[in-house]
C-alpha cells in the first residue's frame, strides 16, 4: 500500500462533540475513535484538556485517552495511531501528561473578541501560556501543534486581516510547534479567501508547516481544502459526518466532513489512506447515536445508493 499523499486529522471526537449539550457516553466516544481508526485514519483528535466548566462534554478526557491508548497498544496495526488533544494551559498539559498523551494542540485566536470569548484572555496572554506549555511539553517529549482561529472572520467583530494570522502563525512556529492549523472557526471563508490568505502566509511560512481547519457553515469547506491543496498544503482537519462547532463562536457550524474531503481528494487521484465506505458507515453510526440527521453530503449520497 502506497503512503497517503495527505494527512487527515480527524477531529470529530473533539471538535465534533464539544458543542453538544447532551453528554455523550464514554463508551460511544471510545467506540467512535476505534471505528475511525479502522477506516485508516491515523491522526485522531481524541479530546480536550480544557476547563470542564467551559466544556463539560469533554470532562472525561482522561478516560477517553486511556481507552484510546489501550486500543492502540493492543490491536494489530494500530500502534502508529496519534491522538492529539487540546491543552491551552499548564493545567491542561499536566492532565494530558498524566493521561499518557504524546501530542498536544495549543491554540489562539487571530482576533481579540473571540480570544476573550473562548479563552477569557487577550491573544498575547494566550500566546504567553501556549509558549510556556510548549516549552514544558517539548521537555517531556510531547509534540506540539498550534491552531490559529478566526483566520477569516471573528464572530463579534468581523473580518480578520491576513497579517494578524501571519503574526500568530509565526509565533507558534517560533515557540516550537511543528505545524500550525489555520482555523476558519465560523466557516465563512471561500476558496478565494483561502487563496488570498495563503498568498500572504506562504511568503514567510513553508507550506509543510501549515494545515487547514475549515468549518463548513457556508458549504465552502471542500472548496477551501482543494484550493489549499493546490497551493501546497498537505494536512487537513476534518470531522466525520461534518460534526463540530465551537460553543464560544456563535454561528459556527460543523467542520468540513471527512467523507466529503476523502471523496474530493481521491477523485483527484490523491491518496488519503482512508476507506471511504467504512467511513460512511461510521458517519451513519455516530449520527444515529447522537440522534441527528447524517450531515455529510457525500456520506448521505453513498449511504442511499
Ligand atoms: P478561566 O476561567 O479564565 O481560567 O478559563 P482559570 O484559570 O480562572 O480557571 C477556572 C477554573 O478552571 C479553575 O477551577 C481551574 O482550575 C480550571 P476552579 O478553581 O474554579 O475549580 N481549569 C482547568 N481545569 C481542567 N483543565 C484545564 C483547566 N484550566 C483551568 N486545562 C480557560 C480559561 C482557558 C481554562 C477556559 O477559557 C477554557 O477552558 N477555554 C477553552 C474553551 C474551548 O475548549 N473551546 C473550544 C476549543 S477551541 C476551538 O474549538 C477552535 C478550533 O477548533 C479551531 C477553529 O475552529 O478555529 C481549535
Ligand atoms: Mg474548530
Image (tube, rainbow, N blue to C red):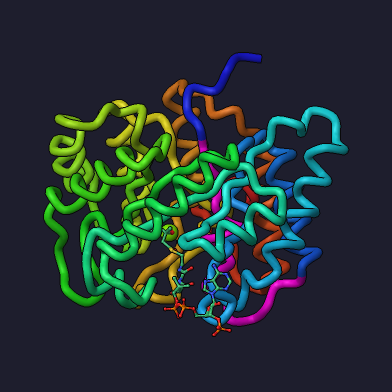
Q: Nearer the viewer, residue 191 or 117?
A: 117
Q: Indicate whether residue 12 is drawn in magenta.
A: yes
The quarter in which the N terminus is drawn is top right
The magenta segment is 8-25
Residue at (59, 42) in percent of width and height: 140
Q: Indicate whether residue 181 is drawn in magenta.
A: no
Q: Nearer the viewer, residue 300 or 38?
A: 38
Rendering coords of residue 267 (x, y %): 46, 28
**In the figure, is residue 203 to the left or right of 209?**
left
**In the figure, is residue 229 to the left or right of 9?**
left
Rendering coords of residue 273 (x, y %): 60, 28
Q: Quadrant of residue 116?
A: bottom left
Whether residue 300 is visible here, answered yes or no, is no
Residue at (38, 45) in percent of width and height: 181
Q: Nearer the viewer, residue 199 or 84?
A: 84
Rendering coords of residue 93 (x, y %): 56, 57
Q: Nearer the viewer, residue 179 or 45?
A: 179
Residue furthest to the right in view is 74
- In the rendered picture of this protein, how many numbered marks are placed on residues? 0
Whether residue 185 is visible here, answered yes or no, is yes
Q: Quadrant of residue 255?
A: bottom left
Taking 181 as reference, is 226 above or below it?
above
Residue at (14, 42) in percent of width and height: 196
Residue at (65, 72) in percent of width and height: 59
Rendering coords of residue 87 (x, y %): 52, 58
**In the figure, is residue 149 to the left or right of 62?**
left
**In the figure, is residue 279 to the left or right of 190?**
right
Amino acid at each position: 500500500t502506497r503512503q497517503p499523499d495527505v494527512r487527515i486529522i480527524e477531529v470529530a471526537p473533539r471538535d465534533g462533540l464539544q458543542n453538544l449539550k447532551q453528554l455523550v457516553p464514554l463508551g460511544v466516544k471510545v467506540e467512535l475513535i476505534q471505528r475511525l481508526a479502522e477506516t485508516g485514519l491515523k491522526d485522531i483528535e481524541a479530546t480536550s484538556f480544557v476547563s470542564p466548566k467551559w466544556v463539560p462534554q469533554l470532562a472525561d478526557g482522561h478516560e477517553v485517552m486511556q481507552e484510546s491508548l489501550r486500543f492502540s497498544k493492543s490491536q494489530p496495526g494500530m500502534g502508529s495511531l496519534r491522538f492529539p488533544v487540546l491543552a491551552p494551559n499548564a493545567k491542561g498539559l499536566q492532565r494530558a501528561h498524566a493521561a499518557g498523551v504524546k501530542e498536544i494542540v495549543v491554540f489562539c485566536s487571530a482576533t481579540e473578541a473571540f480570544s476573550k470569548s473562548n479563552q477569557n484572555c487577550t491573544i498575547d496572554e494566550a500566546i504567553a501560556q501556549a509558549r510556556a506549555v510548549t516549552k514544558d511539553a517539548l521537555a517531556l517529549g510531547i509534540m506540539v501543534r498550534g491552531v490559529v482561529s478566526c483566520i477569516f472572520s471573528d464572530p463579534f467583530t468581523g473580518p480578520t486581516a491576513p497579517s494578524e494570522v501571519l503574526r500568530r502563525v509565526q509565533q507558534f512556529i517560533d515557540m516550537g510547534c511543528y505545524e500550525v492549523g489555520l482555523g476558519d472557526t465560523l466557516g465563512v471563508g471561500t476558496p478565494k479567501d483561502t487563496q488570498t490568505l495563503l498568498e500572504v502566509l506562504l511568503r514567510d511560512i513553508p507550506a509543510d508547516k501549515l494545515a487547514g481547519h475549515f468549518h463548513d457553515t457556508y458549504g465552502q469547506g471542500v472548496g477551501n481544502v482543494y484550493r489549499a491543496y493546490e497551493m501546497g498544503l498537505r494536512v487537513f482537519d476534518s470531522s466525520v459526518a461534518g460534526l463540530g462547532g465551537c460553543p464560544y463562536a456563535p454561528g459556527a457550524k460543523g467542520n468540513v466532513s471527512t467523507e466529503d474531503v476523502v471523496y474530493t481528494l481521491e477523485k483527484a487521484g490523491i491518496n488519503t489512506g482512508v476507506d471511504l465506505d467504512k467511513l460512511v458507515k461510521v458517519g451513519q453510526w455516530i449520527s444515529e447515536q447522537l440522534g441527528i440527521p447524517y450531515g455529510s453530503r457525500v456520506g448521505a449520497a453513498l449511504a442511499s445508493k
